[in-house]
Amino acid sequence: MNLNDLQNISENFQSTQRMPVLFLGHGSPMNAIEENQFVQGFRKAATEIPRPNAILCISAHWYTEGTLVTAMEMPKTIHDFYGFPKELFDVQYPAPGNPELAAETAELLLPLEVEEDHNWGLDHGAWSVIRHMYPEAYIPVIQLSIDYTKPPQYHYDLAKRLHKLREKGILIIGSGNIVHNLRLIDWKNINTVGAGWDWAVEAREKTNNWLLDGNFQPIIDYQKQGTFLEYAVPTPDHYLPLIYTLGLKDRSEHLSLFNDELIGGSLSMTSVRIG
């Protein structure tokens, strides 16, 4: 790609007012087709922000060695789960991709080599929440993968380099769960909103306090905080999308929470809006 190509890419994304950033607790894939307070929260969030020119999603479910960005014209809908009803597998979210935005994203992350991917598509971490926000599927969506070989601080710093996209009408969404331990689900309370083990309650309370105080370093250094976060974050895949969201925050920006509930003992639906 030469300098003229890069200039043409940048011209496709004219400056706009700064877009907010979202972290969405996506929870069970069934939230894609169920009607509940959480999907209502996703819809409400969409009504409270400007209509984006495109969406860049960092999903817990695209966990790779190295960093990739989807660059196809029409990403497929990926049903990356099993054991759910046919109704869920029948869902399609035919949003277009945006190869120009993929190239712009890769450019912003230089000198990191970002591979432009033509095989992935939109996994359920992306489409299960975005379909509630923009059901017409008219807004282009691309995904940026999470490099599982890198520590949380790396992802926080990497996200900062994407900030320019916010000035071009791009909505950046991190999709995962702050508390996410599938091995310790309380099956008797799988659908009980507010049900949480003691460690999950502590994890929610402390991370919420750090978020609202703007004290992000303990969140980044979650592995040093004690047993409650060891249980809440047994693997980093669902947690790291939050780190990307926080890396995009300006110091003066307001941070707020919504969908802030525990469910099933060991999951939190807590979502974050910045800006």
Image (cartoon, rainbow, N blue to C red):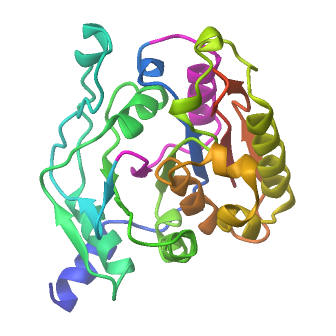
Q: Residue at x 55, y 68 (%)?
A: 152
Q: Position of residue 171 (x, y in %)?
A: 49, 52
Q: Position of residue 164 (x, y in %)?
A: 49, 73
* Image side of residue 124 versus residue 100, left or right: right
Query: Taking the image as drawn, is residue 130 in sight?
Result: yes
Instruction: Indicate whether residue 55 is drawn in magenta.
Output: yes
Q: Hey, which quadrant is residue 178 in on the image?
A: top right
Q: Residue at x 49, y 30 (%)?
A: 133
Q: Foreground: 179 or 89?
A: 179
Q: Foreground: 102 or 189?
A: 189
Q: Is residue 160 above or below residue 28?
A: below
Q: Position of residue 232 (x, y in %)?
A: 65, 44
For the N terminus, the image quarter is bottom left
Q: Foreground: 102 or 245?
A: 245
Q: Residue at x 67, y 45 (%)?
A: 272
Q: Residue at x 47, y 71 (%)?
A: 162
Q: Is residue 275 above or below residue 84?
A: below
Q: Position of residue 203 (x, y in %)?
A: 76, 44
Query: Taking the image as drawn, is residue 134 in sight?
Result: no
Q: Foreground: 229 or 74?
A: 229
Q: Which residues are magenta?
A: 34-61
Q: Hey, which quadrant is residue 269 in on the image?
A: top right
* Image side of residue 256 versus residue 49, left or right: right
Instruction: Indicate whether residue 269 is drawn in magenta.
Output: no
For the C terminus, the image quarter is bottom right
